[in-house]
Amino acid sequence: MTVPLLEIANLNVKFRLGAGDLPVSSDVSFTLDKGRVLGLIGESGSGKTITSKAILRLLPAGGEMSADHIRYNGRDIAALPPREFDRLRGADLAMIFQDPVGSFNPVKTVGWHFRKVGRLHPGGHGGIMADAAEALRQVDIADPKTTLGKYPHQLSGGMLQRCLIALVMFSKPSLIVADEPTTNLDNLVERQIIDLFDKLRREVDASFIFITHDMTIAEQVSDSIIVMYAGQIVEQGPTEALMRDPRHPYTQGLVKTARELEGDVEKLTEISGEVGTGAWPENRCRFAPRCPLYDAACDHAIALHHVKEHGEVRCIKANRSEDAI
Amino acid sequence: MTASADTRAMTGATDPCLRFEDVVVSFTAGAGLVSRLRGNMTQFNAVDHVDLAVRRGEILGVVGESGSGKTTICKAALGLHSMAGGRVTLDGAPFDLSSGAMQMVFQDPLSSLNPRQTVAEALAIPLRLHGLAGKRDMPAAIDALLADVGLGAQFRNRFPHELSGGQLQRAAIGRALATRPRVLFADEAVSKLDVSVRAQILNLLKRLRDTHDLTIVFVTHDLHVARFLCDRIAIMYFGKLLEVGPTREVYADPKHPYTRELLGTLDRQRDAEVSTRDIFNPLTDDTRACRYLGRCPHAMEVCATVHPDHRRVGREHLAACYLYENEGGDE
């Protein structure tokens, strides 16, 4: 049996505030195999970005992470000393942010960024630039030489996002966390970026955690999907099964709206209310205030339970007789 | 160039409510001192001779990528950008800004509401300025507006930071409705909202169109949302209106090559193929030629000479492309 690329067990993130601790993500566990794409779905405040940042140790000040283990290629990296972890991140683990403009130094050229990333490159300056040009060609930038000499503000959002992806791929990472990489982009550029990820996955066998709030995009890019709500995983499973037969009422709502928008309806199905923020009650399902199936039986902490050939669901109403193992 | 009676009749609708006639909005690039001294200040038209008629009671989707001029044309209608040419009329008359007959809702509701005003204060200002409610009936008028957008009276004294994204956008829509507008412009009004809330606001807009006799111009780059919400779709590209027609018809049978490329992104079965062709650059490219020339697979000689005018490709369906001749061209 091969070792998964990434194994996370019971990852918790909390923020220290004056008044006490604010938990933002609770008991997140999942595995990701080599060459696979994991779609991480949720709305703002669901904990999807913070979970990924915790894995890469990029939490903002005040954020604290704990986990039973975070295994990367079978080796626990949760307790790795900072210096060793830094070497891993950047070379092996990389993150692509939503806003490409903020990821570049505005007073330096694109080429400068490649030199920075490639300072340990064996080929020296000439070698770096030749490889950088090739990396840009990989992301379909027509004139890499000129682009390397340009400053970030001289490039369009789509071009810059492609440069960023080329830059991230330059160090040949094996795990890339992409946080809403296409949300600010136009449809045609979005399509290009998605096609590009697909190409990179096939060619360099990279694994992706693709964070998005868009069910349609997640369905297109990922092999498996995790749906997060209020800091918890509420459902996870293979993309095909989860989209065909979503079990959690929240996932059902998301899939239904996505399907309706693709189809032809007069009125969209709404999930009533909005996700709350702050501390959630311990003794009630966190989705209860918005759930059409809520009753007194939901008034306790709900655990994830396994569903055969599907994955895991955090809902006591989702049990079906055929699921019994 | 002025709009001929011909093109006006074609872009027109049976009962035009809001009409854009040959509208031009131009911006200047390189207006800084150095550029001026060097003399390389360039003007370009962010909206370039656009004719468009919006029907009473319809939801018209203006779809395009960033830089297409879709937001600019709405702001020009409201006087937020000055027009370099053409005119905008509402029910046949030049639009009077002070009438409150047209209002706009923006993408980010948090930045469009004053952080130091409660929801009730924000709603009271337009009501008071337009003389729509006095001191005595103000609370009732505010409650009625809140109810229209699905907010309870408990939201009256909340500040913007106390509201969630969906509640904020409801409040912003409520404020826009205060002056009883005939036309509501919504600029990417659901793009920043969470998915589960987006459906609520889209349904709300659809309902308000019916209950408030509204005409809505909905600016978006989301092709799924546009298809759900809009009766007709106008496709813009670098300041030009390339195609306009009933939503179903445009989605089922797009005519302009750009519309085909754009709507092609919805097709999952499409082969992964990345376009690397040249995108129009308004500062360096010939602005007389068709804007889509550099990317168009059907480019012909004539396309490089002058941007095509609109051709009728269906009963209410127009496309600005030389691939088509006017159908039933007796107008």
Image (cartoon, coloured by chain):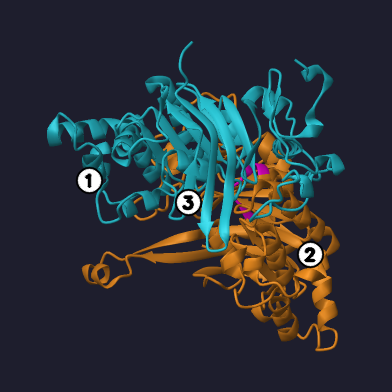
- Marks 1 and 2 in Cβ contact (< 8 Å): no
Can you identify the residue that label 2 sits on? B151
Q: Is mark 3 in CB contact (under 8 Å) with mark 1?
A: no
The colour assigned to chain A within the rendered structure: cyan
Q: Is there one chain holding both mark 3 and mark 1? A: yes
- A176 or A148, which lies in front? A176
User: What is the spatial separation of the Cα atoms under label 3 and label 1, in whole angstroms?
Assistant: 32 Å
Mark 3 and mark 2 in contact (Cβ < 8 Å)? no
Q: Residue at x 23, y 39 (%)?
A: A145
Please say whether residue B286 is visible from this viewpoint: no
Residue at 23 percent across and 31 percent down: it is: A131
As drawn, is A1 to the left or to the right of A288? Answer: left
Q: Which residue is mark 1?
A: A112
Q: Position of residue A234 (x, y in %)?
A: 67, 36
Q: Which amino acid type is shown beneath numbered disc 3? A: Gly
Part of the protein shown in magenta: B219-224
Residue on which disc 3 sits: A63
Seen from the viewer's position, the closer of residues B38 and B185 is B185
Nearer to the camera, A204 or A302: A302
